[in-house]
Amino acid sequence: MSTLARGPLSGINPVAKLGAAFLIAIPLIATIDWVSAFTALVLGIPLIAMSGLSWRGFWIRTLPVWIAAPLAAVSIALYGERGGAVHFHWGLMTVSDMSLELAAATFFRVLAIALPGIALFSGVDPTDLADGLAQRAKLPARFVLGALGGLRMVGLLVDDWREL
């Protein structure tokens, strides 16, 4: 049984999907404000919808992201850069206006980078990606074989986890 998602985006070359993921991620890593991250998240919703994942599959695959994003935001809120009005202070923990703004930005950035990435790569066959990396991106054979082996191991890990 194939676990790959089939949707309108499934016919796109995996290297193009990889490029799209980088186009989404690089500006978000460079910016610090929450507005651009929230905008990227909202604009990524059509990608998620066109990925072909069922809603159940989407929530199961993205559950770690939904756990990690709030945890990252809380840690930034508690230990982030101080600035503006201080709302809470205890030991090393200081919650201020600046740390809350950075926490919101971190939360939305994690979601905006991870959710479309998971949706884009849910339907990628490791062999197709390796072919694309070798033929389109002209990458060295060692790198391509390493990427293929790594992606196949992820698939085996998922299958083993399901069996457990």
Image (cartoon, rainbow, N blue to C red):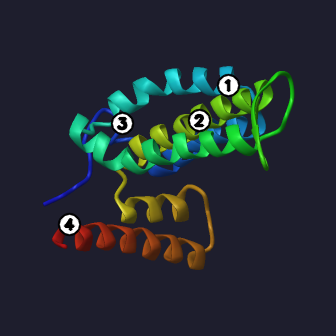
Q: Amino acid at mark 2?
A: Phe
For the residue carrying disc 4, how many other residues have a C-alpha within 10 Å: few (<14), some (14-19), or many (20+)?
few
* Secondary structure type for disc 3: loop
As drawn, the residue found furthest toward the left would be 1
Residue 162's label in the rendered image is 4
Mark 2–mark 1 CB contact (< 8 Å): yes
Position in image of residue 79 (x %, y %): 75, 45
For marks 4 and 3, give the one nearer the viewer: 4
Position in image of residue 56 (x %, y %): 22, 40
Q: What residue is at 24 percent from the left and 34 percent from the top?
A: 55
Residue 34's label in the rendered image is 1
Position in image of residue 57 (x %, y %): 25, 44
Q: If you read the primary sequence from the N terminus, does the residue marked by circle 1 or circle 3 appear first?
A: 3
Q: Report the residue marked by disc 3.
A: 9
Q: What residue is at 45 percent from the left and 46 percent from the top?
A: 67
Q: If you read the primary sequence from the N terminus, does the residue marked by circle 1 or circle 4 appear first?
A: 1
For marks 1 and 3, give the one nearer the viewer: 1
> Measured along the vertical axis of the image, is residue 136 above or below residue 22?
below
Q: Report the residue marked by disc 2.
A: 107
Q: If you read the primary sequence from the N terminus, does the residue marked by circle 3 or circle 2 appear first?
A: 3
Q: What residue is at 53 percent from the left and 27 percent from the top?
A: 41
For the residue carrying disc 2, how many other residues have a C-alpha within 10 Å: few (<14), some (14-19), or many (20+)?
many
